[in-house]
Image (cartoon, rainbow, N blue to C red):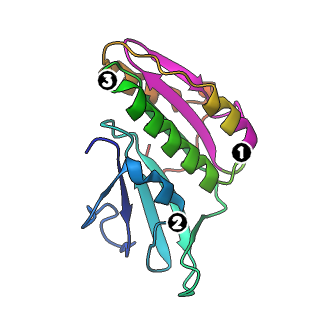
């Protein structure tokens, strides 16, 4: 499951929302992320970055035209938290793969105060807030901030990272507190 991205197609919105895919693909295939062929009117994409279940849920609509099966984000505000594993066991190459996948997510989202907002944590011996939900508003700002993220290395303190993730979903860190339509 290391560095796995799982697209989920033909999702039954009335039933279970998270079925395992028939054929997952590796994060090494992250260049395919924004153009994964999905079928049906409504789709969800769940990204799993490294072995952390940092749940990224982007609700997207798909074009039904056979010649243009591309997906685009719905014009809706989501707070998306990404947890990067920067521990020594990951290594620089795998960390670079996580950064590349994060770049692809930024390429597919619509950002703004009432649109998607992104926060990024990196963990190893300690957990570092790379940026909070309210730090940036444009794709260019996010791209620059992602370009400044440096691999930490160190021990693997996953529990502390998850605790920090829960703390990050607060107004203090720029998260928008609203209805329960999106899992946190």
Mark 3, residues whose alpha carbon is within 10 Å: few (<14), some, or many (≥20)? some
In whole angstroms, how far apart are the C-alphas of marks 2 and 3? 31 Å
- Quarter of the image where one finds residue 94: top left
Report crowding for label 1: few under 14, some 14 to 19, many 20 or more residues within 10 A (C-alpha).
Answer: some
Horizontal and vertical percent for residue 169? 52, 33
The span picked out in magenta is: 116-142
Identify the residue under disc 2: 35
Q: Is residue 13 left or right of residue 158?
A: right
Q: Looking at the image, is mark 1 or mark 2 nearer the viewer?
A: 2
Image quarter where the N terminus lies is: top left
Q: Earlier in the sequence, mark 2 or mark 3?
A: 2
The span from disc 1 to disc 2 (Cα, nearest Å) is 18 Å
**Identity of the residue drawn at 51% across and 42% down:** 100
The reply to whether dot 1 and dot 3 touch (C-beta < 8 Å) is no
- 137 left or right of 94 in image: right
Identify the residue under disc 3.
Answer: 158
Residue at the front extreme, as displayed? 93
Closer-to-camera residue (164/83): 83
Q: Which mark is residue 139?
A: 1
């Amino acid at each position: 499951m290391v560095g796995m991205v799982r697209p989920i197609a033909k999702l039954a919105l009335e039933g279970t929302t998270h079925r395992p895919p028939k054929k997952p693909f590796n994060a090494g295939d992250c260049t395919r992320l924004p153009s994964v062929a999905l079928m049906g009117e409504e789709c969800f994409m769940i990204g799993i970055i490294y072995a952390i279940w940092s749940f990224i849920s982007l609700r997207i609509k798909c074009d039904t035209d056979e010649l243009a099966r591309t997906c685009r984000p719905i014009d809706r505000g989501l707070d998306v938290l990404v947890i990067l594993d920067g521990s020594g066991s990951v290594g620089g190459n795998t960390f670079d793969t996580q950064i590349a996948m994060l770049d692809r997510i930024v390429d597919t989202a619509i950002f703004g105060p009432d649109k998607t907002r992104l926060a990024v944590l990196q963990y190893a011996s300690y957990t570092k807030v790379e940026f909070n939900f309210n730090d940036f508003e444009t794709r260019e700002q996010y791209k620059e901030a992602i370009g400044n993220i440096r691999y930490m290395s160190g021990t693997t303190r996953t529990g502390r990272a998850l605790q920090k993730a829960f703390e990050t979903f607060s107004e203090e860190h720029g998260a928008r507190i609203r209805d329960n339509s999106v899992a946190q």
